Image (spheres, helix red, strand yellow):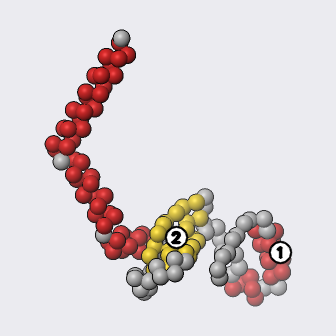
Amino acid sequence: MKGCLSLIIKTIIAVLVFFGLLHLGVIDFIKEKIEEYRGNEEVRQEKMVDKTKDVVDFSEINKEEYSINKDLKLLKNRMIVAEHNSTSQKMIMIEPKNEAFLTKEDITSEKIEEKINTLVDKYKYKLVKFEKI
């Protein structure tokens, strides 16, 4: 019997809290913020462009043509996913946290073959998938 009574009391408290928040306007405030984020795509895109400008500069690209969908951080890499609006093709820009693969000095040095072989061995079994290039 004690469990049933505590359930009823918890339900009454939850209902009172809900109506209290409704009366204070908190729920309307939350709905307004969600609609502001969802409804105003232009503001969201501007925030995404500012947030991702250290990886890729989208300031010169036509905003009606491309849109930034996601800004992800996976493992050691930061990835930005952009979509071409008319063809729905996705483009991924990756900012690795490790050093550059080949530098100008590597290309002009005599140990270029050794450097390429090291890179091939290092990335031989990593999956990279390209579609519709």
Could you tell me the amino acid type at mark 1?
Asn
Q: Amino acid at mark 2?
A: Ile
Please name the residue shown 79% across and 68% down the image.
124
Horizontal and vertical percent for residue 123? 76, 68
Residue 29 numbered mark, or none: none
- Image quarter where the C terminus lies is bottom right
State the residue at coordinates (49%, 79%).
84
Q: Which element type, helix, strand or loop, lies under badge 1?
A: helix
Q: In this view of the protein, which residue sits in the foreground, 99 or 5?
A: 5
Looking at the image, is 15 positioned above or below residue 56?
above
In this view, the residue farthest toward the top is 1
Q: Disc 2 vs disc 1: Cβ atoms closer than 8 Å?
A: no
Residue 116: give x, y in percent of width and height: 80, 77
Look at mark 1 in the image and give the residue it sits on: 117
Horizontally, is 86 left or right of 91 in the view?
Answer: left
Q: Residue at x 80, y 72 (%)?
A: 120
Disc 2, SS = strand
Q: Position of residue 55 (x, y in %)?
A: 51, 74
Q: CA distance from mark 2 to mark 1?
A: 29 Å
